[in-house]
Image (spheres, helix red, strand yellow):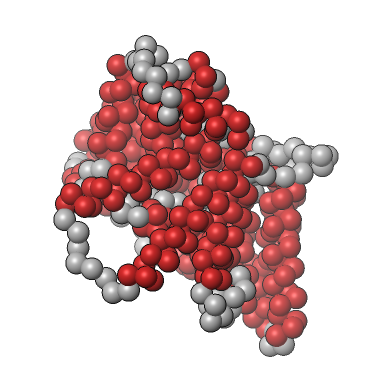
Amino acid sequence: MLLTTAAYFSFLAAVFFAYWLAARYRLGALAVVLFANYFFYARWDLAYLAIIPAASTCDFFIGQALHRSTHPGLRRLIVTLSIALNIGLIASVKYLPVLPWVLPLALSFYGFQSLTYTIDIYRRDAQPAESYLAYLASASFFPTTVAGPITRLSTLWPQWSKREMLSAENGGKALFLIGLGLVKKLLIADFLAESLVNRVFDLPKLYSGAEVLAGAYGYALQLYYDFSGYTDIALGSALLLGITLPPNFNRPYAAQNISDFWRRWHISFSNWLRDYLYFSLPGLRSRWKVFAYLNLVITMMLGGLWHGAGWTFLVWGAWHGVGLAVHRWWQTLRGKRTPAPALAARFARAFLTFHFVLIGWIFFRASSLDTARDILYQITSGTISFVNITPAFVLVAVFAAAAHYIPKRWYDGGLRLYCQSPYYAQAAAIAAVVVAIRYAGGASAAPFIYSRF
């Protein structure tokens, strides 16, 4: 059940009314959410009805055992069981197609969220959930199932205890986010993919260097709008139930360096890599500084392999890992911070950072290293032809780029204006979005890119 379909929004409306009718009774509200979660999984495959409850139950009791245990060796053994369970679950669905089951939905985001719970308790950074039902509802919360954002369960399950009803402001914000997410996905990301990007990355040798470069730019925009569009819909869906999820994007292509980029792109994933992988690698406390740089490369390479067991993802991870290590070394070399750079210097830094990221995206999207090599060769070939670039593609790409760089205060102002508008004006805006999608969008929505990760 894709988050862009009529079936999903019918489901969301039913959950919304059932949840708030039962909201005065915490047990009833949790039962509604848990049923909705499992129904959502079952729409993908009935096998999830056995896998998810069993895995969640194991992690719940592992958390209880970690909290009660004081013996260091035993606690390490217990948390290792949770790590093996969740990583094994991810790997079995993702990397072992020879197994007798083939599931349509990867469980990466479920596994990462579950690990935040047990590892936080192991580190004494969080308390275990007091309610088994609240934990089950949080671990399998349906808006985060497909592509995050990865939410620390210790911040999610306490929110079910809230007694406040949904405010008009939060309701308006939720609808704004959902409408914005649909525009990003269906009117920008899917259009760019269908108009040029997919063809360029499938058969790069058929296009001029200028067209391949335009396709690479288009993919950078497609990926951002596809993924951030999903995040907006997920955040809006959760907010309709009074649940706040963490932000996942903050104008990433305006980043001033590669470290800044990872503070803006897929924020919940980069935080997860930092908190649960990078800080867990050996050598960080060593007097040999080389371990800090080496661990950055290892962390990003493992992050690349999480996206897929292929050389392209490994190269993408290594590219970013080396970039982060070099930037960390440069910061250490410079020492004290320098005054804020001038506007021209900020533009130059953002320009260079974006193109560093763009090279990585070529490997990320290419089906093989040979395809990535062909794309890079075509871009540097100097051949110029624009016959396959339509005016509509240029218009949408320019609009998407401009929208990405608008100041945050403009976005906040638009959100505030929408929330303060009368309900009929909000409804009219949503109706306009639906009409635009109906007449300007593609025949059908493509799956979200990150749903396969």
- Vertical placement of residue 251 versus 280, above or below: above
The answer to which of 131 and 226 lies nearer the viewer is: 226
The image quadrant of residue 224 is top left
Residue 276 percent across, percent down from the top left: 57, 67
Give the quarter of the figure containing the C terminus: top right
The answer to which of 126 and 157 lies nearer the viewer is: 126
Lateral position of residue 11 relative to residue 182, left or right: right
Residue depicted at x 48% and y 67%: 155
Lateral position of residue 232 relative to residue 44, left or right: left
Lateral position of residue 242 relative to residue 176, left or right: right
Residue 30 percent across, percent down from the top left: 55, 58
Residue furthest toward the top?
Answer: 387
Residue furthest toward the front?
Answer: 381
The image quadrant of residue 227 is top left
Residue depicted at x 38% and y 65%: 330
Residue 225 percent across, percent down from the top left: 39, 37
Residue depicted at x 30% and y 16%: 391
Is residue 310 visible from the viewing direction of this image?
A: yes
Give the quarter of the figure containing the N terminus: top right
Residue depicted at x 68% and y 88%: 70
- Vertical placement of residue 141 versus 128, above or below: above
The answer to which of 130 and 265 lies nearer the viewer is: 265
Residue 257 percent across, percent down from the top left: 35, 55
The image quadrant of residue 357 is top left
- Vertical placement of residue 259 versus 387, above or below: below
Is residue 445 visible from the viewing direction of this image?
A: no
